[in-house]
Amino acid sequence: MGKIYKNSILYSILSYVFLLIFLFPIFWIFLLSITQREFSGTIQIFGIPDNQYTPTLGNWVTELQTPELYSSIMNSMIIAPTSTIIALILGLPAAYSLARFKFSFNSNKYILIFFLALRMLPILSVLVAYYVIFNIIYLFDTKIAIIIVQTSFILPFVIIIVRQAFVEVPLELEEAALLDGASHLGSFLFIAIPLTIPAIVASSLIMFAFAWNEYLIVFSLSLFNETLPMYVRSGGLSSGFHFGGLAVRTMLTMLLPMILAILAQKYIVQGLTLGAVKG
């Protein structure tokens, strides 16, 4: 009992240490965002300002009055949710099929490995081909092109995560629904999906975060459809880089994914641990 208690304390301490390591950059960025533009002193290495430091909201006021900020937010609010929704529409039936059916032409295991390999594939290895294709079909520098590529790269998440959740759903429940007159589609929509909501929410948030934070795809396939990560990158002013303004843009970019993660915390934990006992 004492050994278990000591291990619990050790794990708690390690958890808090890693939490502080994770939160420190966010704290430092926040301090930079309320730094005066003309402030010549530097934030100290541990995020402790010197005695001449005076916080200000001037950086926030300036950035919130910039029209480009709102256009980049609008682009991100279109591209990231659309990519996530399309990936869910395509991925949920694929995950269900891999959980419930055996494909004669190939093993389900190898199909899963294929989807996992798509996620591990370096984006740069295919962006040149996409660049040429979208130029040929006149989709370069459009939101449609960005959504197509982002969807293809986040799709494996929903297939891999939710497929295991579908495996954990008792088959007897679906068979009972079929005996009561439900179709296979009805069983999928009204039995399987409601029982795997935590896994669906978890995979959706992961996909949304990747689509929201994606930089390389947008940079390669677009010139004027600037998303929030691209807007952070374009933080150079005529007088040079203003790190207070860059910090504000960074905080705004992180804000929505952090809020969604906090609101859906219980679903994330349930979804990512669903099937862990069997796995």
Image (cartoon, helix red, strand yellow):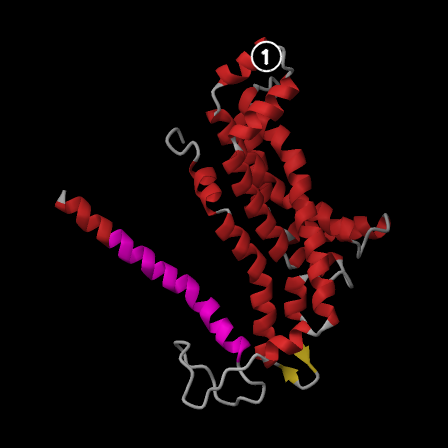
Question: Residue sitting at 62 percent across and 55 percent down?
Answer: 212
Left or right: 9, with 143 as reference point: left
In the image, which residues are magenta?
10-34
Q: Looking at the picture, does residue 27 appear above or below residue 278?
A: below
Q: Is residue 97 visible?
A: no
Q: Position of residue 88 (x, y in %)?
A: 63, 37
- Magenta residue check for 28: yes
Is residue 181 at least partly visible in the picture?
A: yes
Q: Position of residue 243 (x, y in %)?
A: 57, 78
Say which residue appears at 58% left-offset and 43% top-offset. 204
How far across and how far down the image is residue 233, in percent? 64, 69
Q: Estimate the x, y position of residue 96 in percent, counting from the top left.
A: 58, 26
Q: Tell which residue pokes out farthest to the left in this image.
A: 2
Foreground: 208 or 65?
65
The answer to which image quadrant residue 174 occupies is top right
Q: Is residue 124 magenta?
A: no
**Image-based side of 230 in relation to 111, left or right:** right
**Hey, what amino acid is under mark 1?**
Leu
Dot 1: element: helix
Comparing 125 with 163, the one in front is 163
In terms of image quadrants, where is residue 182? top right
Image: 207 above or below 68: above
Up/down of 85 relative to 262, above or below: above
On the rendered image, what quadrant is the N terminus found in? Answer: top left
Quarter occupied by the C terminus: top left
What residue does disc 1 label? Answer: 178
